[in-house]
Amino acid sequence: MDCIEQTSVEKDGYAVENLEPSPVQEEYAPVIFAQDTIAHVISVDVLSGKEDRENVLRARASGKGVLTAPFPLLKTGRLGVILTFAVYERDLPSNATSNERIQATDGYLGGVFDIESLVEKLLHQLASKQTILVNVYDTTNLSNPISMYGSDVSGDDLEHVSQLNFGDPFRRHEMRCRFKQKPPWPWLAITTAVGILVIALLIGHIFHATLNRIAKVEDDYHEMMELKKQAEAADIAKSQFLATVSHEIRTPMNGVLGMLDMLTDTHLDETQQDYVRTAQASGKALVSLINEVLDQAKIEAGKLELEAVTFDLRAILDDVLSLFSGKSQEKGVELAVYISERVPELVVGDPGRFRQIITNLMSNSIKFTERGHIFVTVHLVDEVRDSIDVETGLSSQNSLSGFPVADRRRSWGRFKTLSQDGLTSSLSLPSSNLVNLIVTVEDTGSGIPFEAQSRIFTPFMQVRPRNGSTGIGLSISKCLVGFMNGEIGFASLPKVGSTFTFTAVFSSVSLSANEVKNQQKSNQSSSASAEFQGMRALVVDPRQVRLKVAKYHIQRLGFNVEVAPDLNQSASIISARNPFIDVVLIEQEVWNKDLKASSLFANRLKNVDCGRPPKLFVLANSVNLGRYSALCTDDTPSIIMKPLRASMVAASLQRAMGVRNKGNFRNGVLANLPLQQLLRGKKFLVVDDNSTNLKVAAGALRKYGADVDCVDSGRKAIEKLKPPHIFDACFMDIQMPEMDGFEATRRIRDRENNINARIQNGEVSAEHYDDISNWHVLVLAMTADVIQATQEECIKCGMDGYVSKPFEAEQLYREVSRFFQASSYRNE
């Protein structure tokens, strides 16, 4: 079978402007795929021409191949035919009726044959010797046969006529063969029989091969459709499974985190508050593990989206530090965070996804690091580019713990946005409303083997499975960084460590001064910075990087910080300073270097001449208090355990200095939260079959001044929300026995619509319904199921919004403020 040799449409006279729209008809059969050589037929309706239409309809009704009448081929001018087959969406029995075939038709396949070229190639050897002359005719119309191949030759030569069966019962073809020169009779008989047999077999073979090929295409099509159905069913099953798993695990976690959140609003001392915050961080980490699996499914489905809310970067990193503090102290690994002063306090982006990236990278570091440090830094991209040679290389003098690290320059070189030779990214351009950050997570762990480095971001790839993990954390992190318009890369040396670096673009905050102040307060930890404002602290550490980190955290509390490399210079500073030093913080390495000298230094602090003696603290990764007490007795300093976090440092200082904590910081800012103003006096109905979830949700709403009523089933909710009622909103759980939240909401909406219609039609007076003519109670879905399909179903059934469990103040405010900010949602 030869393809028709075509050039472009314009060269062959088929300009696009000469094509006409297909006439209006009951059905169309446009060409949707064609070889490049006949691409001009794409979009041509094959049912618009009389003969083409008849052929297509015959093929569809018969289930057999149908041939067109011979026609001149474009460009070559030689005669050709089109063989058309119908493709059915399912296998049909051989005795299927025409109507059954018509109903099952899914499309058509067509093949173009150049008859002259076909026969010439089949008879190349015989034709070259000119021993046999062959003519092929279309004899469908016996009175006017159409010559398809060969030229008419008159003479008395012996002619043999045979019928050709191309599989089309509606058309007839015959082949006529003759010798050019008459041979002897014995030879004539043999060669004639053999030649005609060979020709017929070859031509028949070509067409039957075409039939078999088309049959295989049909079989492949049916198999592909079946696989498609199976894949769709598997995808639905996977989504349902993920939704169920998400709900069943997140529901009890909602109770745990909700109760911890309520506990923070009680009177707790500093240590208890820190314990609660650590428990909250651990609970959120468990939820994040669940979310990782869901995220991978969302990424594969292309449905992952990012939030755009205002958040505090420093608070996020403090939370992540608290999550890994226990493990780092157990290993004796130093864990630290440093954020440049040029990085703004607040940015607009997705805090959960940013936290997820940092958590994934630090989780890997803590697994593979047994000594040394894990160091997280955050800078502006422009700031790092201006000083790209600072603190690079393998020199241990420039590292946090004194252990060598992987070369950061090799990591930075992987970024197009930071490359001196690469293309300039738009993300690097100065912009007044963009904050382009570069974050590094540096460790001194075992490093990544060279053979595994090319596959490190591959989903489910694990460098060392014995450490236990899903293997999708880095893959998800890479996708999230991409969503944040950034890039991620790494440098790693076996037995030295790894440095992962990524960029992320956030928007700057455009809030009023009061809004910024309130947001900072709500995002800050419970460090009472006002209590330390104006105090002076002295940090003693010979290692510059570590000193810089300690200074950063102490300054966050409001201290004015002095620094010294050793105890001798510290003593000089304390003696000379006026005003005096309030706090002295000594690095554990300095204190342990000479415990006798350290004890003498502690005694000297008691006898300073200027005012009360400074409080002494040791900054430690791991502590053996016996060593201190054996030599220092009453002079044993207070211990501040690393990693340094604002809340933990503040709590330690408050205990040692006798500074009273003026209550939970959250209680202090609660009255200023806009959420309190929105919810005060509002009447809410909470619907959930889980008693713990009811208690958590009700407690969260009552905390902000709302009046809350609770029921444990969808049927009870329908009765409670029967107009007229007094509720401003309903928080509806989705997965409940007997009647789920979807069905309950549908029935609530149906009854509201019915009542509203009766009032509008004058069938009943609005006075019977508290003078409210348009009933529509705000219904917010409250569920642990975070699958996108569930959110879509919430809106479809008539719900107004969606709050995932466990919900927090910021999330609750964002959803509720859409309806209550301006006025009550119910329109009278």
Image (tube, rainbow, N blue to C red):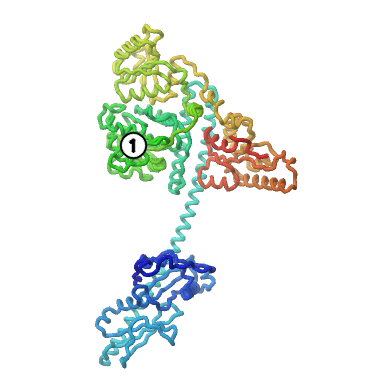
Q: Can residue 738 be seen in the rendering of this structure?
A: no
Q: Position of residue 270 (x, y in %)?
A: 48, 21
Figure label count: 1
Relative horizontal placement of residue 713, taking residue 22 as reference (left or right):
right
Front in this rendered view, residue 744 or 487: 487
Q: Is residue 407 above or below residue 97?
A: above
Q: Quadrant for residue 350, please give it.
A: top left
Q: Quadrant for residue 548, please give it.
A: top left
Q: Is residue 193 above or below residue 385?
A: below
Callout 1: helix, strand or loop?
strand
Front in this rendered view, residue 141 or 806: 141
Q: Which residue is disc 1 drawn over?
A: 500
Disc 1 residue type (three-letter): Phe
Relative horizontal placement of residue 682, taking residue 68 as reference (left or right):
right
Q: Position of residue 819 (x, y in %)?
A: 59, 38
Front in this rendered view, residue 827 or 311: 827
Q: Is residue 606 above or below residue 381?
A: above
Q: Position of residue 437 (x, y in %)?
A: 38, 35
Relative horizontal placement of residue 131, taking residue 475 as reference (left or right):
left
Front in this rendered view, residue 197 or 128: 128
Q: Sort mark 1 into few (<14), some (14-19) or many (20+) by Cα contacts within 10 Å.
A: many
Q: Position of residue 532 (x, y in %)?
A: 44, 18
